[in-house]
Image: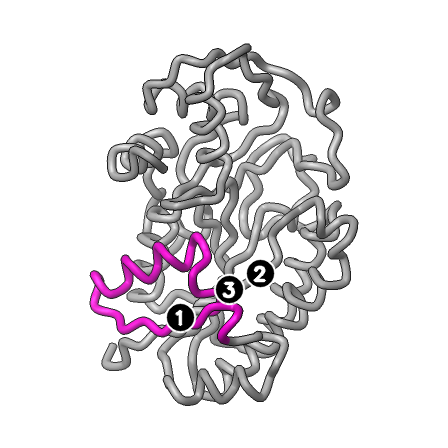
């Protein structure tokens, strides 16, 4: 591939920071304006910025991801940014012949299935956040045929904010055992694993929809146990139910994502979630 330029929306965010570090190591030239520098709802400005770079691909990482505010005070903003903003990114990328690589989520599914969701399962979001991200997926498919939609879940990465950082902070404080939900299950996933996967997919020119989470599965309780163990924190952890911690937006009981598309493209499974956590803590002992 002669064009090695990548444009990233949402520069400075947790995933974008990892991509900004990892893509140049793989030989890509990265342009990643922050959300303050470039508003994806301003289509003319967005088109001008992307046209100036003329990238091979636009990685669309800008999003409203706070699930509970999306359900309450930021519902309209969620659909503006995650839906209309995604349409704008896809339009701007398509105009310069770039592939749109859109980051999506497990929340596009209902969470009711008794097995991991694969890429060809029917969607059915139960939250405003999930519905807004699904609207973004639909817009990307409509406006940029040369697209890759990568669904991720339970994400953490250097600098946070993330569940891992919260648990490390609480674990270091000591005190009574932490109550952590044990009836929601998913794939804890590091930004480094996502970056590795996106680089492989870019190099292969894969299009379509893929699930890009770590291999293996855990509940939040099991995930927290592993965080405490590998971060050498002594605070106890006890299981509880989702019903004990009601939230404005319902959480999926099943967030597991099957990597069927990766396997069909001959790319295999990403790193296991606990190995990824160990690597993260070794490289980022303070988070």
Q: Residue at x 58, y 33 (%)?
A: 115
Q: Residue at x 56, y 29 (%)?
A: 185
Res. 266 visible in picture: no
Which numbered marker is on residue 102? 3
**Mark earlier in primary sequence (1, 2):** 1
45 is higher (above) or lower (below) than 197: below
Which numbered marker is on residue 126? none
Q: Residue at x 48, y 21 (%)?
A: 222
The answer for how far apart the CA atoms under marks 3 and 2 are is 10 Å
Instruction: State the image coordinates of residue 278 (x, y, percent, origin top left).
Output: 30, 30
Per the rendered image, the range of residues in magenta is 9-37
The N terminus appears in which quarter of the rendering? Answer: bottom left
Q: Nearer the viewer, residue 174 or 27?
A: 174
Instruction: State the image coordinates of residue 149 (x, y, percent, origin top left).
Output: 51, 61
The answer for how far apart the CA atoms under marks 1 and 2 are is 14 Å
Residue denoted by label 2: 63
| Helix, strand or loop under label 1 | loop
Residue denoted by label 1: 32
Q: Residue at x 29, y 33 (%)?
A: 285
44 is higher (above) or lower (below) than 254: below
89 is higher (above) or lower (below) than 261: below
Is residue 180 rendered to the left or right of residue 285?
Answer: right
**Mark earlier in primary sequence (3, 2):** 2
The answer for how far apart the CA atoms under marks 1 and 3 are is 14 Å
| Helix, strand or loop under label 3 | strand
């Amino acid at each position: 591939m002669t064009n090695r330029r990548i444009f990233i929306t949402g520069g400075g965010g947790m995933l974008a920071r990892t991509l900004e570090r990892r893509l140049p190591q793989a030989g890509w030239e990265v342009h990643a304006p922050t959300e303050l520098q470039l508003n994806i709802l301003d289509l003319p400005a967005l088109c001008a910025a992307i046209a100036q770079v003329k990238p091979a691909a636009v990685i669309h990482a800008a999003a409203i991801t706070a699930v509970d505010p999306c359900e309450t005070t930021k519902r309209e903003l969620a659909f503006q940014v995650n839906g209309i903003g995604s349409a704008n990114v896809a339009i701007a990328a398509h105009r310069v012949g770039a592939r749109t690589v859109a980051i999506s989520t497990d929340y596009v599914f209902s969470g009711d299935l008794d097995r991991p969701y694969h890429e060809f399962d029917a969607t059915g979001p139960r939250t405003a956040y999930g519905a807004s991200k699904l609207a973004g997926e639909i817009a990307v498919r409509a406006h940029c045929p040369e697209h890759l939609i990568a669904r991720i879940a339970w994400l953490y990465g250097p600098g946070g904010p993330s569940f891992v950082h919260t648990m490390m902070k609480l674990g270091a404080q000591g005190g009574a055992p932490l109550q952590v939900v044990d009836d929601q299950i998913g794939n804890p996933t590091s930004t480094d694993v996502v970056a590795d996967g996106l680089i492989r997919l870019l190099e292969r020119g894969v299009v379509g929809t893929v699930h890009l989470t770590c291999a293996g599965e855990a509940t939040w309780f099991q995930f927290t146990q592993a965080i405490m163990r590998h971060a050498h924190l002594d605070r106890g952890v006890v299981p509880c139910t989702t019903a004990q911690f009601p939230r404005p937006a319902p959480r999926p009981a099943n967030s597991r994502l099957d990597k069927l598309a990766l396997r069909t493209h001959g790319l295999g499974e990403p790193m296991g979630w606990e190995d990824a956590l160990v690597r993260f803590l070794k490289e980022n002992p303070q988070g």
